[in-house]
Amino acid sequence: MRIHDIDQADADIDYFATDAAGHVVHVASGGGVLPESVAADEVALLELHQYFLTRPETDSAVAAAPAVAQDGAYPGAARYARRGLFSFAKTRLHERTDTRYYAVARPLRPLTLAELPPPLAELLGRTRLPGSAAELDTLEAASIL
């Protein structure tokens, strides 16, 4: 089932991707436009969401951008980073013209695509970032495939 544009605009949807290095990435949409690979399959998104929410937390996370992630503004980002995911979020929620995401939390031990069960790795592989999340401070929505 597809996630329609109106639903994308009304919700801060957590979605997931992998980068060129095989790291797992969390993105909080902030009411922004979802990549087509995510919007096309709500069932797959929910399956990935459930998996990452139920993973045990490990090491503590590191705030990636203290100016952006101040005062615990993104508690979900730290939660995902403690599960091994790099986390990106928007600062201007529900402004669809704002297409920039900022790194808000980084894992101390990144989770990789190779560590996931094969069916989930296949789902996650549909949505990809250019480059390595470990080296990105910002991310443009259009660069997410």
Image (spheres, rainbow, N blue to C red):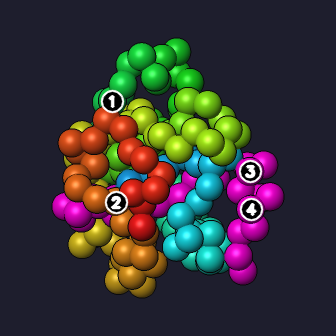
Kindly identify which residue carries mark 2: 129
Would you say 96 lies left or right of 25 here? right
Type of amino acid under label 4: Asp
Kindly identify which residue carries mark 1: 64
Instruction: Between label 2 and label 1, give the one nearer the viewer.
Output: 2
For the magenta stretch, what is the residue range? 1-24
- Where does the N terminus fall, quadrant-wise? bottom right
Residues at marks 2 and 4, CA–CA distance in whole angstroms: 22 Å
Residues at marks 3 and 2, CA–CA distance in whole angstroms: 22 Å
Q: Would you say the residues marked 4 and 3 are in contact, meaning their CB atoms lie under 8 Å apart?
A: yes
Among the two numbered marks 1 and 3 on one chain, the one whose residue lies closer to the N terminus: 3
Would you say 23 lies left or right of 50 here? left
Type of amino acid under label 3: Ala
In the image, what residue occupies the spot 78% across and 58% down? 7
Would you say 33 lies left or right of 67 here? right
- Where does the C terminus fall, quadrant-wise? bottom left
Residue 16 point in image, percent of width and height: 47, 60
Among the two numbered marks 3 and 2 on one chain, the one whose residue lies closer to the N terminus: 3
Q: Secondary structure at mark 3?
A: helix
Residues at marks 4 and 3, CA–CA distance in whole angstroms: 6 Å
Residues at marks 1 and 3, CA–CA distance in whole angstroms: 26 Å
Kindly identify which residue carries mark 4: 5
Q: Any magenta on residue 59?
A: no
Residue 78 point in image, percent of width and height: 44, 36
Kindly identify which residue carries mark 3: 9
Type of amino acid under label 2: Leu
Q: Secondary structure at mark 2?
A: loop
Q: Camera-side residue: 141 or 66?
A: 141
Q: How many C-alpha atoms fall within 10 Å of the one at disc 4: few (<14), some, or many (≥20)?
A: few
